Every structure is written in structure tokens, then in C-alpha cells.
Image (cartoon, helix red, strand yellow):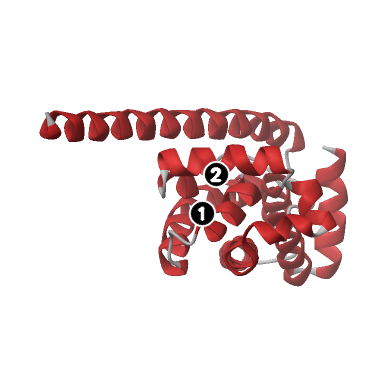
Amino acid sequence: MELLERLIGIFAEHGYASVFIALLLCGAGVPLPEDITLVAGGVIAGLGYANVHAMVGVTMVGVLLGDASMFLLGHHFGARILRLRFFAWLLPPARYAKVQLKFERYGNRMMFVARFLPGMRTAVFITAGATHRVSFWRFLLLDGLAALISVPLWVYLGYLGADNRDWLATWIHRGQGSLWIIGGALIAIAAALWWRHRRRQCDDRC
């Protein structure tokens, strides 16, 4: 909660612009938790420093712009992006190969699921762009649909818990656990659908 309180202080002083910039940094892979950033944006709205509905709009744009930037960097540079020191640290070759393998297996579903898996988003979005198998608009649609679930959830949670930090801390913890569960369930469903599709293809050939 120390990080949350620090972000609340910064955001309360600098408003929407500071929340927007923080989310761009989250999208770029800076070790700043996106969920805590969104909650802090909701808290300052609950404290009267911003309008909560406007905050949802600002955070949606910030999240999507940050994600799109990573996708476009991957699309433009491909594997060459790993030569840059920051991205080599963020996405070591072994991890890049692992994400590529998962992307080959699950395809577009990985882009939707990645939003619910902290620590995976940036790697998946860069890899999605580098594969050149996904159009930018398809990426934006899938990421936007996932963001419509996660972004309002965190912002409105912060808004509702602005005056009760103990309650808020409890629900942040529960929410983080729930997103991992949702992400795991979506991966399991995607794997089952992929296996079923492959089995049907095999039966048709046989």
C-alpha cells in the first residue's frame, strides 16, 4: 500500500496527465504495477480531485496507447528490438522464444488473455507485433475488449474505497488473485478449443 499512497499523492497534485503518463510507462514495461496505478486514479476521483467517469476514459486511452506502442515497436523492429538494452532486459531471448511458442499455439487469444496476466502483457504485445500475423486493428480490438473489463474494474474499485483503505487493500488483493484465475481459465479454454480444432482437422484428414 506504500506505493499506492505515493501514487495517490502524485496524482492528486498533477491530475489526469500524471495518471496518463504513468500508464504509458506501465505499457512500456517499467516496473510500475498497472492495477495499482488504475486504483490510485480511482482513489483521487473518490477524494474529489477528478471525475471518476472521465478518469475511466483517460485510463482507457493511456492503457491502449501504451499497449499499442509496444505492438508497433515489435511490428517495426521484430526480433531486432532485443538488441536494445532495455528490451533485452525486459524480454531476454529465452523468454521471447517462450512467448513466441505460446503465441504460435494460442494465436490471437493470447493477446486478450495477456491483459489479465501482470508481467506478461508487454512481452506478448511485442511478440504479437513481431510475428506480423496480426493486423494492428485486430490487436487493438482484442486488447480493447480485455481493457473494457480490467480498467473500469480497478478504477471504480479505487473510487469506492477512497475513504476506506483497509477495505480497499483487501479487495485489491482479491482482485489481483481473481485476475490470475480469470487469466488461467481463459488459457485453459483456449487450449481446449485449440485441441478440439486440431482433433477435428485430424479426423477430416483421416
Compared across the picture, whether 75 is left or right of 103 comes to right
Residue 32 appears in view: no
**Numbered label tally:** 2
- Position of residue 138 measured from the top left corner of the image (x, y, whole percent): 40, 63
Read off the residue under disc 2. 100
Residue at 44% x, 33% y is 187
Residue nearer the viewer, 93 or 12: 93
Placement of 94 over or under 80, stated as above or below: above
- Position of residue 42 measured from the top left corner of the image (x, y, whole percent): 67, 54
- Position of residue 90 measured from the top left corner of the image (x, y, whole percent): 76, 48
Give SS at disc 1.
helix
Residue type at numbered disc 2: Gln
Q: Disc 1 vs disc 2: Cβ atoms closer than 8 Å?
A: no
Residue nearer the viewer, 29 or 83: 83
**The quadrant where residue 195 appears:** top left
Read off the residue under disc 1. 147
**The quadrant where residue 93 appears:** top right
Residue at 72% x, 46% y is 91
- Position of residue 36 measured from the top left corner of the image (x, y, whole percent): 72, 45
Residue type at numbered disc 1: Ala
Placement of 78 over or under 165, stated as above or below: below
Placement of 92 over or under 166, stated as above or below: below
The crowding category of the residue bearing disc 2, from other C-alpha atoms within 10 Å (few below 14, some 14 to 19, many at least 20), is many
Q: In the picture, which quadrant includes the N terminus?
A: top right
